[in-house]
Amino acid sequence: MAYDEDLANRVRELTGKEKGLTEQRMFGGLAMLLNGNMAVAVRGQGGLLVRMDPDTSDKVLDEPGAAEMVMRGKPMRGWITVDESACRKAADLKRWVTRGIAFARTLPPK
């Protein structure tokens, strides 16, 4: 399944002025990397994948549409999937993208 181009363009609008930002196809979608670290991705399965601090990511799991990413049956702390329904409003999308960018800023460049 291809990723949602409209959602990708909305994410680009929010990240466009970020220095060190690149795009790369991964996770079946389109990832936005900040200095080589993934911040947020538009998923091929729909919605977003947001990278967050693993020590605080559990706090967002009560928000609508948020779930911990599971890879090969293993929960991935700090990697949050966000259902496309939770990204429709501009304020909601901005909140998720901002979280991913903020965490990526804390990581050393690759």
Image (cartoon, helix red, strand yellow):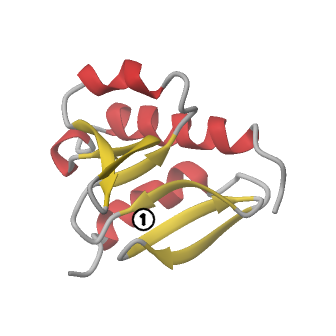
Near-viewer residue (72 or 91): 72
Furthest-right residue in this view: 109
What is the x, y in percent for residue 40? 50, 53
Relative to 64, 71 lies left or right:
right
Residue located 37% across and 41% down the image: 93
Relative to 36, 90 lies left or right:
left
Q: Quadrant of residue 96?
A: top left
Helix, strand or loop at mark 1: helix
What is the x, y in percent for residue 107? 76, 44
| Residue 14 drawn above or below residue 58 | below
Furthest-left residue in this view: 85
What is the x, y in percent for residue 100? 55, 42
Residue wearing tag 1? 9
Relative to 46, 36 lies left or right:
right
Residue located 59% across and 52% down the image: 15
- Which image quarter holds the C terminus? bottom right
| Residue 64 drawn above or below residue 87 | above
What is the x, y in percent for residue 68? 32, 40
Residue located 83% across and 56% down the image: 109
